[in-house]
Image (cartoon, rainbow, N blue to C red):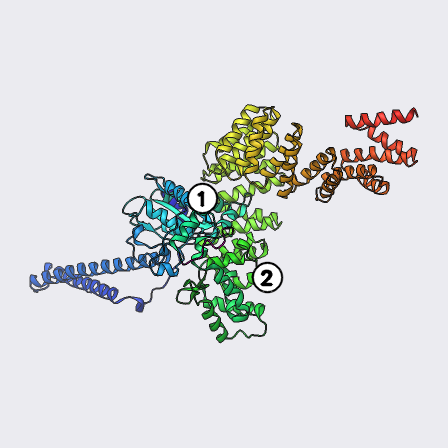
Amino acid sequence: MDAAKRFLRGEMTMSKRVKKSIRLKNSLTRDQRMARLTLIFSGITLVAAAALGLSKALDKSDIPIWIVLTLTAIGVISGTLGKIAEWREKKIRTEGDRRQKLSSLLRPAMHSERLPQVDDLSVTELGATPTRYSKQGVDQYVARTEIDLKLQTALRCATPPFPFILLHGDSKAGKSRTMAEAVKSEWPAAPIVLPKDGESLAALSLLEPSLNISRSPAIVWIDDLTITDLTYLSSAVLEEWSARAILVATMTTKRYKDGLKTGAEFGTVARDALYRAIAYELPFDLTSDERHAAQQLYPQENINRNPNESISIGETLVAGDELIRKLHAGREECPAGQAIVRAAVDARRAGLFRPISEEELGKLFPLYLRQVNRGISPTTEQFSLGLRWAAEPVASQVAILQQVSGDKWEVLDYIVEAETGVHNHTRRPLPNFLWRNLLEATTPADAMSIGVAAFFSGQLDTSHAAMLRAQTYERHHFMATYNLAAILDAQGNAESAKTLYRQIINTGHPEAAPRAMVNLAAMMSKAGDRIGAQVVLKQAIGTNHPDMAPRAAFDMGINFAIAEDFENSQRCFQQAIDTGHLDIVPHAMYFLGTVLESQNKADAAKNAYLKAIESAHIDMAPRATRSLAALLDAQGDADGARTAYLQAINSGHPDAAAIAALNFGSFLTRHGDEVSARAAFQTAIDSGHPQAAPQAMLNLGLILLRQGDRIGARAAFEMAAGSGDSAVAASAMANMGALFMEDGDESSAYSTLQLVVNSKYPEAALNASYNLGLLLYKQGDVTGGLAALQKAADSDYPDLAQAAKDVLDRLATT
C-alpha cells in the first residue's frame, strides 16, 4: 500500500512540488492573530519574570518573590492558552482544507466526510436520468433478469481483493438504473464513495488520513466512465481500492470498445484497467418478457406499439424520440437553440466530459449558429433565447440541456449518442473548426481528455496540440508527455518519439517510465534493432510494474520468435504466463501455441490454445479457437475441427471469425460438402475482411464453376478481381480468361490472360500462360503458342507442368 501511494504521488504531482509563498499579515484570521498575540504576551511575561528572578537572586532587587512567581504563572498560563488557541485554529483550518478538498473530489450527493449508505441515495443521485416518474416517486424498475443475476453474483464478494465491476451499453439502455438496483440488492447498508471522476478516485487514494470507511467492503461508484477516467485507474489505484471497496462503474459500449483497441499504445493504461474489470454488456433492446413487464409498470407509455422496433426502457422514459424531434425542429423553431445544443453535444464528443460553462458555450455559439442559419446574428439575446429553448423540458420532464450548477450545463447523453449515429439516427460529423476552438475555449486541465478523444477520432495534429497544452497542467504532465510520444510515433516522427520516451524513462516515474520502456522497445524492434529492444525490455521487466513487466516479458517472447530463437521465445512466454496478468496471459498462451505448432509439437500447442480459449479473452480466445481448428484439421480430427471452426465463426471476432469461415469452407470442400462450403465462403465474403473475403470470392467461384454455374462463377471471379487483393485478383483473372476462351470471346480472353502473364504472381501467371498458349496456337500463332506452353511445362507446379507437356507432345505428333 505504501508503494501504491508512492506511485500515486508521483502521478499526481510534478518534480518541483514545493512552491514558496508570501503570507501577508492581513491574511491572518482573527483567531490566528489572537493566538499569536497571546504567545507574544506569554514570551514577554516570562522574559520579564526571568529577569526579575535573576536580579533577586543576585540581591540587586528588593522586589517581592510573589511578583516573580505571579509573572511566571501568568506567562506559563498565557503561553499554554496561546498554544491551545493555535492548535484549535490549525485543526479548524486543516479540517476546512480537508472539507474543501473532499468537495472538489466527491459528487454533490456526498455532503460531508461521513459516508452515506447505499440505500441513503436515490437511483437518480447515483446517475439515472431524472424523469417525471422519478420526480413523482413512481419510477418502477423493469427487471433485466439475465444481467441482474450476473451483476448480483459478481457483487457477492465478502473478502478482499474486491472486484472492479463494469456495465457497458448504449446510452439510455438503462445502465445506471440496472447497476444501482443490483448494488442496492446486495449491499444496501454498505458505505458508498462517489468520486467525481477517475482523477478524483486516484486523488482520494492519496488522502491522509484516508476516508473513514466504517466497514468493508464499501462501494465506490463511477457513473459514465470515460477513456480519460480510465487513464487514472492504474494498477496501483485499483489495488489500493480493492483492499477496501468494490468498484462499480458504467460506460458506453463505444468507449468500452475504444479502450480495448489492441495495439493502441496510446491507451495502454485504459486498456489494462478494462481487462481488470468484470465486464458485462446491457442490451439496448428489451426482450419480449421485459417489454410486457415494462408495459404493465408504465401503462401510460406505448411500449408495445411495434414488437419489431428497437426500444429501451431508458429511451422510452426520457421520451428520446420526442427530444430528437425537438432538436431537428430547432433549425426552424429556434436556430439559436439548435446551435447551442450542437455546440454542447460536440464538445462532449470531443472529450469535454465535465459540464460546459455558459462562457465556453458562448465562444462556440457563433460558429454553430453560422452553420444553422447564417442570417441570424449571434447576439446575447439570441444566446439567452437558445439556452431557454434547449433547457425547456418535454412531456417526460426531461430537457435536452440541463443546468447542473451555477452557469454549468450538461447535455443529455442520449442526444450525444444519437448525433453519433447510434440506433439508426443520422450521424452528424464533427465540424473541422471544433477542435482548435474547443482547446482555446477550455483550460489546460481539460486538454488531456480532448487530446484522447482527438486521437481516437483520427485527429492526430489536434491530439498533439492538446497534449502539449496538457503538459502545462501539473497533474497531467507525465502522462501527457507519454501520450505525446505515442502520438509522434503515430504521426511518423519516430526519432522525436524515441527521444521523449527516453526522457520519460530517465525521470524514473513509476507509472510512465515502464510504459515508455515497452513502447520504446517496440519502436526499436520495428526498426530492426532487436538487440537494443531486448535490453530495454529487460529493464522494463526489472521494474516489476504490475502491467508493464508482464507485457515486456511477452514482447520479449515475440522478439525471440521473430528471430526464430524458439527456445528463448518459449521461456519468455512462460515467464509472462506465470505473472497471471489477465490480459497478457491469454496473449502469451496463444503465441506460445503458435511457436510450439511451428516446431511440430502439436499436443503441446493444442494445450496452449485450449488454455487461451478457456480465458474467454475478447481477442485471443477467438484467435486460439481458429488456430485450434486448423491444427485439428491437419491432424485429421474432422469432428473436432468442425466444432472449433463453428465456435470461431460464431465468436464474431473481426479477424478470427472471417478467417475461420474461409478455412471452414475449404474444409467442407475437401469433405465433399460443397453446398455448406458455399455458405461458409459467403460468410467470409460478407465479413469484408481484407484477406479472407477476396480468397473466399475466388474459392466460391471455383465451386460454382465445378457445379456448372458459369454465370455465378464469373460474377464471383469478377468480385475477386476487383477486391483489392492483387494476388487473388491475378488468380481470378486467370480463371476469367479461361471462361472467356470457353465462351468464344477470344479478344477478352487474350487481353485478360496477357495481363496475368505479365503479373508478379507466378502460379497465376503460369496458369494463364498455359491457357494463352492454347489460345495463340488456335489463332495460328504457333510460335507464340508453343513458347507459352513451354513456359508452363518448365514450371515447378507438377500438375500444371504435366498438363502442358501432354499438350506439347500431342501437338508434336499432329
Choose between 544 and 165: the one closer to the eye: 165
Q: Amino acid at mark 2?
A: Asn
Which type of secondary structure does the marked residue at label 2 adopt? loop
Measure how far apart labels 2 and 1 are at the Cα level: 35 Å
Specify few, some or many for label 1: CA neighbours under 10 Å numbering under 14, 14-19, or 20 or more. some
- Quarter holding the N terminus is top left
Q: Which mark is residue 432?
A: 2
| Mark toward the start of the polypeptide (2 vs 1) | 1
Q: Is residue 791 above or below residue 719?
A: above
- Quarter holding the C terminus is top right
Choose between 65 and 415: the one closer to the eye: 415
The residue at the point 43 percent across, 52 percent down is 174
Specify few, some or many for label 2: CA neighbours under 10 Å numbering under 14, 14-19, or 20 or more. few
Residue 350 appears in the rendering: no
Percent across and percent down for residue 378 are 53, 73
Q: Amino acid at mark 1?
A: Tyr
Residue 768 appears in the rendering: yes
Q: Is residue 303 magenta?
A: yes
Percent across and percent down for residue 499 are 57, 48
The residue at the point 51 percent across, 47 percent down is 257
Choose between 256 and 60: the one closer to the eye: 256
Residue numbers of the magenta segment: 300-308
The residue at the point 10 percent across, 60 percent down is 69
Please name the residue that numbered disc 1 is placed on. 280
Specify the principal SS of the magenta part.
loop
Left or right relative to 367: residue 398: left
Left or right relative to 511: residue 643: right
Percent across and percent down for residue 358 are 46, 68
The residue at the point 53 percent across, 58 percent down is 419
